[in-house]
Image (cartoon, rainbow, N blue to C red):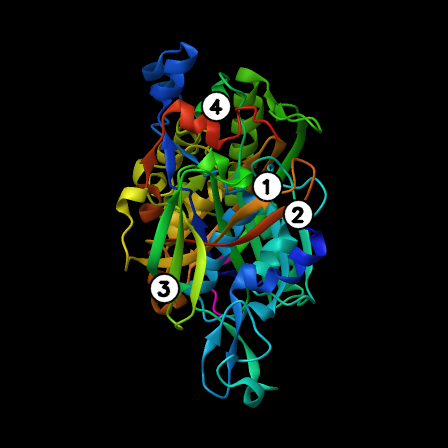
Amino acid sequence: MANPRYWRENPSRYNLIGKRCENCGTVHFPPREICPKCRRKSIGKMKSHKLSGRGKVYSFTIVHEPMPDFSLMKPYIMAMVEMEEGVRLTGQIVDCEPARLSIGMEVEATLRKLGQEGSSGIIRYGYKFRPR
Amino acid sequence: MMFGHGEKDVGIVTYGAYIPRFRILPEEIARVWGENGEAMKNGLMIFSKSVPYPDEDVITISVEAARNALARADLDPEEIGAVYVGSESHPYAVKPSGTIVAEAIGASHFITVADYEFACKAGTAAMQTSMGLVSSGMAKYSLAIGADTSQGAPGDALEYSASAGGAAFIIGKEGVIARINRTLSFTSDTPDFWRREGQPYPSHGGRFTGEPAYFRHVATCAGELMKVQGTQPSDYDFAVFHQPNGKFPTRVAQQLGFEKKQYETGLTTPYIGNTYSASMMIGLSAILDVAKPGQKVLGVAFGSGAGSDAFDITITDEMENYNKAAAPTVKSLVERSELLDYGRYAKFKGKIVMKE
């Protein structure tokens, strides 16, 4: 991934900054410029909103054929996490054996390495989740 | 005294620690290298050491520790004026760890940031710089972090101790829970331990790391600080020293005249190994986890190369109102553990050469 494209998304990846529609109150992540529910009524009313980082596992899968950046962690867990704010995020679950994980388990966001551009390129950081 | 004057009413406003959850036992390392595990364990007084997951490094550990510190305090991260990260395992040779840490804790962009390096005492050097900035009025709060994912060459004695962890202290004048009455340093050119640029593993002088390095610097620095402060070991409720293993801090504490009840609370290395830049700071965090107003703490860090930073600390009444429960204690971080065999440890630490 090109550095600028990654860099632009750092506020969301580091600090879970999404957007909240001031018209209907729905929180969106990643940030959106327009609320798909309110459409034109949301123009100018989408405000930055930091998620609490707390949520519950909505669904998950165990990955046995990893992408190169994840090969040392195989098998690893990818989950859909329903945040306290209602929005669902996809992320890796760390500090948890696959056998221990269950739907509904409470998790919290943590900052981890997401990958790197080889041994001389940039290191990408962002949110993952772990049991609370 | 050339250093340590002038700091007034400066101290720790909040603190946080972080220890990765994986551990390896000395017996397991010894099994692979044909050593006597029992002898290594007892010789070093290290019963297990922490190991970072493959997605953890000094930056993620620093962020965890700093977020734990912020969770305990009613403090706007935008009021932090400086971020210093002390480590000897910064992920980048050029690009400060502090830039990513500052962004990830929601600090302002109008701050000063730098990475520090002084072997195992880079974090306390960051604390001293922070004290200077705060007492001079240049910053309201300054964040000092010590964190490492230290390296020990496979089969070397260091492999039994080199571990991972971090501690973050926010230094300020308002809402101080632990006042730093005085700091003092002792530094000399002593080649006890080093790592040349580009080398993956450090080198050390074996037994030379003991008397002329660790013991001389720690004992001199602690002794001088007590002389300047007019105190003696019995005046302190707690004492914590840099912990390259369990044995050195125990011996230096006894040499200085401290008793077990004073130094056992801050002695964490036997269970998590040597966290390098975080070693004394995690020990100090373990003390802050239990300390009560009015109690006094002596903390002495050591960095190879070599130098010591000593701190005379008094717990203030603010500790009563401090929201300690908002972040995990050192004890809970130590207890949250999962054992690894040497194979998984080697994989996690990147000791196995992979195809790119």
Report the amino acid beneath label 4: Glu
* Mark 1 neighbour density, 10 Å: few (under 14) some (14–19) many (20 or more): many
Q: Quadrant of the C terminus of chain B?
A: top right
- Mark 3 and mark 4: span between their CA atoms? 38 Å
What's the mark number on residue B87? Answer: 1
Q: Chain of mark 1?
A: B
Q: Chain of mark 3?
A: A
Badge 3 and badge 4 both on one subunit = no
Query: Residue at coordinates 66% horizontally, 60% vertically from top-left?
Result: B133
Report the amino acid beneath label 1: Ser
Task: Give the labeled residue for mark 3.
Answer: A55
In terms of secondary structure, where does tag 1 sit? loop
- Mark 3 and mark 2: span between their CA atoms? 34 Å
| Residues tagged 2 and 1 counted as in contact (Cβ below 8 A) | yes
Task: Give the labeled residue for mark 2.
Answer: B115
Report the amino acid beneath label 2: Asp
* Mark 2 neighbour density, 10 Å: few (under 14) some (14–19) many (20 or more): many
The quadrant where residue B318 appears: bottom left
Viewer-nearest of discs 1 and 3: 3
What's the mark number on residue A60? Answer: none
In terms of secondary structure, where does tag 3 sit? strand
* Mark 4 neighbour density, 10 Å: few (under 14) some (14–19) many (20 or more): some
Total numbered labels: 4
> In the image, residue A77 lies at what x, y percent?
39, 46
| Residues tagged 3 and 2 counted as in contact (Cβ below 8 A) | no
| Residues tagged 2 and 4 counted as in contact (Cβ below 8 A) | no
Query: Residue at coordinates 36% horizontally, 30% vertically from top-left?
Result: B340
Q: Chain of mark 2?
A: B
Magenta span of residues: B175-180
- Mark 4 and mark 1: span between their CA atoms? 18 Å
